[in-house]
C-alpha cells in the first residue's frame, strides 16, 4: 500500500486533494461525504473514520479489503491512497448516486418483487465471490448495500470494516442487531467465535425478508423473542402447522428458501447460491395472486374471442400448475388458493 499523505480537513477543503461538498451519512465510527477529487475532477465518496475509535491497523485492514475487492462489479470501488487528517483516517470510494438500499424500503411494504429479485441475484453473486476468496462480510444490511440506480439494476456491497478471513477468531459483538444469527446473539461478552460464511447467509435471509415485507422477521434471533420462537417452532414442524402471521406475506413457494437461509445449525447454511434456485417462483403473496388473476382473465378472453390457440397442461403433485402455451410463449400460474 502507498504511504499516507497528511492533510487537514478544514471548512470545505481537504488540502489540495479534495473539495468536500456535503455529508452523505454518519455512524458511530465516522462519516461519509460527497467530494470532488481535485486531481481528476471526479465526484467521489470520502469515508472518514474517527481516529479515537479506530486503530490505525483496523483502518488499514478495511482499506486493504476494499482495494482487494475493487474491480468486481458487486463491490464499491476504492480509489487512490488513503489520507490521514488530524482527527480522521480518510479514503475515497466510488460514489453511489442512488444512495443505499435502505433508502428505498417502504416500512411494512418493502420494495417491488422485481427489484427484490434483482438485488437477490447481485448480492448472491457478490457474496459467492467474497466467500470463494475466504472472506466474510460480517455486516450485511441494506445500509451497506449501495445503489447505482433506483431500480436496482446495479447494486454493490460496501463497508468492509468488520470483514475478516474465514477461520479468524473474533470476540462477541455488542449490541445485538436484527441481522445477527443465533450463534452470534447467544455469544457471551467474554466468548469468541470463529468467522464463517454462515453468518453472512443468515444476514442475507434477513435482508431479503425486509425487502419483501418492509419489516424485520424478529428483533433478535433469541428464544426469548416471541417472533423468533414462533419461527423456530414452525421450522421444526414443516407441513404440520401454518406459518406465523408475518410469514403469510411471503409466497409459500419460497418458504423453503428461508428455512435454508435460517437453518439453526450454521453448518447447514453453507451455500448462498441456493437463492438462485428460487428466482423463477413468485416471492410475494400479493404479487403472485394478482398475476394469477390477470393470467386467468387473459385465458378467458382468448377462449371467447378464439384469436389464439391455448394448450393447457395440468401437472400432478402437491400443488397444481397450469402451463399456458400461446404461440410459443409459455407462462406458469398457480391455481390453488393460498391460505
Image (cartoon, helix red, strand yellow):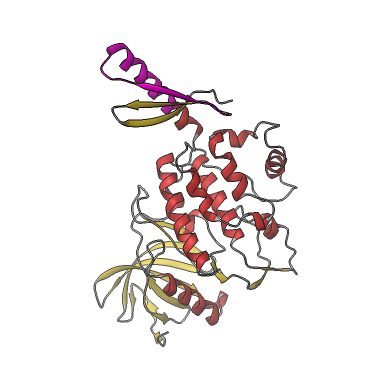
- Magenta segment range? 290-317
Q: Is residue 91 above or below residue 291?
A: below
Q: Is residue 49 left or right of residue 171?
A: left
Who is closer to the viewer here, 28 or 64?
A: 64
Who is closer to the viewer here, 235 or 170?
A: 235
Location of residue 208 in the rendering, given as x and y in whole percent from the top left corner: 52, 47
Residue at the extreme top of the image, as rendered: 304
Give the position of the N terminus as an image quadrant.
Answer: bottom left
Q: Is residue 209 left or right of residue 6?
A: right
Residue placed at 59% from the left, 50% from the top? 261
Location of residue 339 in the rendering, given as x and y in whole percent from the top left corner: 59, 25
Location of residue 226 in the rendering, given as x and y in whole percent from the top left corner: 71, 42
Q: Is residue 311 magenta?
A: yes
Q: Is residue 250 visible?
A: no
Q: Is residue 339 left or right of residue 323?
A: right
Q: Is residue 238 magenta?
A: no
Residue placed at 74% from the left, 48% from the top? 223
Residue placed at 50% from the left, 41% from the top? 212
Location of residue 250 in the rendering, given as x and y in whole percent from the top left corner: 54, 36
Q: Is residue 181 visible?
A: yes
Residue at the extreme bottom of the image, as rendered: 3
Amino acid at each position: 500500500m502507498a504511504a499516507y499523505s497528511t492533510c487537514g480537513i478544514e471548512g470545505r477543503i481537504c488540502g489540495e486533494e479534495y473539495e468536500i461538498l456535503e455529508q452523505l451519512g454518519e455512524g458511530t465510527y465516522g462519516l461519509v461525504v460527497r467530494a470532488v477529487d481535485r486531481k481528476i475532477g471526479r465526484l467521489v465518496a470520502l469515508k472518514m473514520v474517527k481516529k479515537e475509535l479506530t486503530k490505525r491497523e483496523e483502518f488499514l485492514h478495511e482499506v486493504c479489503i476494499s482495494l482487494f475487492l475493487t474491480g468486481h462489479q458487486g463491490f464499491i470501488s476504492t480509489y487512490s491512497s488513503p489520507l490521514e487528517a488530524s482527527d480522521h483516517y480518510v479514503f475515497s470510494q466510488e460514489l453511489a448516486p442512488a444512495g443505499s438500499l435502505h433508502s428505498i424500503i417502504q416500512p411494512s411494504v418493502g420494495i417491488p418483487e422485481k427489484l427484490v429479485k434483482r438485488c437477490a441475484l447481485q448480492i448472491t453473486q457478490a457474496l459467492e465471490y467474497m466467500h470463494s476468496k475466504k472472506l466474510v462480510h460480517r455486516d450485511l444490511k441494506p445500509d451497506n448495500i449501495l445503489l447505482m440506480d433506483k431500480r436496482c439494476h446495479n447494486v454493490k456491497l460496501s463497508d468492509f470494516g468488520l470483514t475478516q478471513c474465514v477461520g479468524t477468531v473474533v470476540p462477541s459483538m455488542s449490541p445485538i442487531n436484527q441481522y445477527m444469527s443465533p450463534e452470534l446473539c447467544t455469544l457471551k461478552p467474554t466468548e469468541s467465535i470463529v468467522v464463517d460464511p454462515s453468518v453472512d447467509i443468515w444476514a442475507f435471509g434477513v435482508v431479503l425478508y425486509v425487502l419483501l415485507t418492509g419489516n424485520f422477521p424478529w428483533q433478535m434471533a433469541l428464544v426469548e423473542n416471541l417472533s423468533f420462537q414462533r419461527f423456530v417452532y414452525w421450522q421444526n414442524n414443516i407441513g404440520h402447522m401454518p406459518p406465523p402471521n408475518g410469514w403469510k406475506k411471503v409466497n409459500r413457494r419460497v418458504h423453503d428458501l428461508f428455512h435454508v437461509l435460517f437453518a439453526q445449525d450454521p453448518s447447514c447454511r453453507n451455500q448462498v447460491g441456493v437463492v438462485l434456485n428460487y428466482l423463477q417462483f413468485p416471492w410475494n403473496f400479493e404479487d403472485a395472486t394478482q398475476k394469477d388473476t390477470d393470467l386467468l382473465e387473459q385465458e378467458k378472453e382468448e377462449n371467447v374471442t378464439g384469436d389464439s390457440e391455448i394448450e393447457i397442461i395440468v401437472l400432478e403433485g402437491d400443488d397444481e400448475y397450469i402451463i399456458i402455451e400461446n404461440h410459443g410463449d409459455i407462462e406458469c400460474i398457480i391455481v390453488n388458493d393460498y391460505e
